[in-house]
Amino acid sequence: MIYFVVIAAVLALSFAAFNFLTVKKMPEGTKEMQEIAESIRIGANAFIHYEYRIQYIVVAIVAVILAVVTTWHAAVALIIGSVMSGCAGFIGMKIATYANVRVANRARETEDIGETVKVAFRGGSVMGLCVGGFALLGLFLVYMIFGIGMGQLDITDASYTNMLGLSFCPFTMTLSGYALGCSMVAMFNRVGGGIYTKAADMGADLVGKTEAHIPEDDPRNPATIADNVGDNVGDVAGLGSDLLESFVGAIASGIILAYHMFSKSIAEGTGMSSELLKTLILFPLVFVSIGLIASCIGIAGLLFKKHMSDDPHKDLNKATYLSSGTTILLGLVTSWCLFHTYDSASLRTILGFRCGWLSTWIAAAIGVVAGVVIGMIAEYYTSAEYKPTQNLAGASLEGAALTITQGMALGMKSCMAPCIILGTGIIVSYQISGMYGVAMAAMGMLSFVTATVSVDTYGPISDNAGGIAEMSGLDPKVREITDTLDSVGNTTAAIGKGFAIGSGALAALALMISYLYSYNDFNTALILNIVEPMTLAGAIMGGALPFLFSGILIEAVAKAARKMVDEVRRQFREIPGILEGKAKPDYKTCIEISSKGAIGEMKIPSLLAIVVPVACGFILGPEFVGGILIGSTICSIMIAIYAGNAGGAWDNGKKYIESGKIAGSGKGSPAHDAAVVGDTVGDPLKDTVGPCLDIFIKIMSTVSLVAVAVFSQHNLAAWIMGMMK
């Protein structure tokens, strides 16, 4: 059945190639449209090439350290993971820079919202299909090369000893290396892209719309090209690498946990066979392959649909629901095929499976349903179709201060319902399928990630299309169509972020259990005592880390945005005729400001998640790091949900006013100015802080899992305590 994984990967990548070429064959439109699109494309290419040079230097350094401290297999797997994640992000960014102008042109030619949605979604589907395809292709390579080719699947104890004399279970370490490679690229892409896009966006809005009172994406604004470049490098390349990392992390957490459960079963004498272990390893791989095929069906269902509605959100939701529903149905068959031959009583005794062969399917289905429900909650709080965002738009009539206050309240209140869903999912999946079930719930939530990323990526492509339509002076009807698509895109982005942080929390919990297994005797109960001083101190510090991380990111965006604001003001002041449309702005300087700001500011937050758990582990030991993981995970969930929903609501509240839904208020009105300020405040929250936090908690968990075998035996605190005895 393992070959089913590579079949699904090849199918997805072939479908992605077909959609890529189909989009490229479409006409780009007028000469002005082509010139603007080319400028965006050049800026995006320049930034991502420079960013990749830096991040792969870091990847190479970490790979060398990993080879010395752990195993060379993990180092090679790390490189494989980084290449897969990097390829997905790069190809997704490339198609976005081709699709944006073609979306604007389709709207210009047809003035049909349904046909325009298809082009944007086809471009977005390339990113989604590459995420699922490259992630599974890399996992297949790791499984075949190291698992089967080098026989690591059959080694279940810590029998591999490295040059430092440290021993590891080889396949779990190799898989951790692969996940870490994906995580590192995701962190750099999300942080670097997030700082870039929001610095440009804030600079363009604060001076262009608020001070000069010119429309969004007006060609007279020098920051518009940089803003559109940012959509591609942050919201497309960053998004793709982010969710590929979440996808791989969820799968890896289940496989690594299965190995530790096997060792515990051997220690306790409960009789788990090596055949059952291989089945537990195979199940998540086959299940997500089913999900990838189901996503291909959902994507094809929309792309080849003859009659589209005038409601893009409805059509996009249908694609998501078809993908998730098909995943659940086919997943039932997968669970039966893999587990029906095992005795139900043995599964209950060994693994805690209370429903026999159905247990793993129920846990995965819980994850699927929980992901959809969390997405629906995000839609309720961020869509202009519902009261929370409508009330937020109404608050803009009373000024910027109340707009910000109302948005903060909305974001905070929106945290409760998703956390109830997450908590319920953890409890129910554990009761039905044990701790392995929690890992399967995380895997289930992202099993149809290809569909969710496709829907999510459609948003920034539509946003770019609106910018091109505005800058090239197309008919206002075209901008109305792209604005409708963009408004839906803000909601789909919030839904995607809900999926990412929800699955990240579940995967982090499964990795936490593996972390405890890694340094405790399998004959002892796995309990991390939260009231033990070392653990409690770690939890307090861990709770503060996401705030430190978020603060650094927001400050980085503010620094770069401040430079952008100064540059836009300078050009308006020193270049005669810009605001009259008689002189052309200097777009290149604004692109350089965003690029330098992003590259310069992304290094510290990107390395924070790697350095902190390792440093704390070698100083204070594994219990302290365990506390850090608990505290940071809990706080990151809250901040990420708050940031994503508040930011999305501020953005859609602004668009609600722009669409004329509030009588007497439209573009250029005091209410619109207040809404622009709210949207600007929300920009770094929804597109920088929120998306980066789910990577932050998973990379901390993965790094801790990799390093705990070393610092559990060699740390300063244990040495001092030994000296005191």
Image: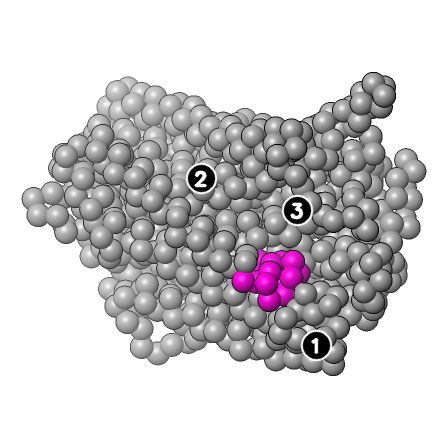
Q: Is residue 519 left or right of residue 660?
A: right
> Is 209 located above or below residue 296 in the figure?
above
Q: Which residues are magenta?
A: 428-444
- In the picture, the quarter occupied by the N terminus is bottom right
- The Cα atoms of the two marked residues, 1 and 3, are separated by 27 Å
Q: In the image, residue 495 lies at what x, y percent?
A: 41, 55
Give the mark toward the camera: 1 or 3.
1
How crowded pointer 2 is (Cα within 10 Å; few <14, some 14-19, many 20+) is rated as many
Image quarter where the C terminus lies is: top right
Relative height, residue 548 to residue 509 (above, below): above
Give the label on residue 512, or none.
3
**Helix, strand or loop under label 1:** helix
The three-letter code of the residue at mark 2 reads Ile
The residue pinned by badge 2 equals: 639
* Magenta residues, dominant SS class: helix
Query: Is residue 70 in view?
Result: yes
Secondary structure beneath dot 3 equals helix
- Which color scheme does this rendered protein use? one colour
Q: Looking at the image, which residue is at 59% across and 40% down?
A: 630
Asked whether 344 falls inside the magenta stretch, the response is no
> Who is closer to the viewer here, 595 or 206?
206
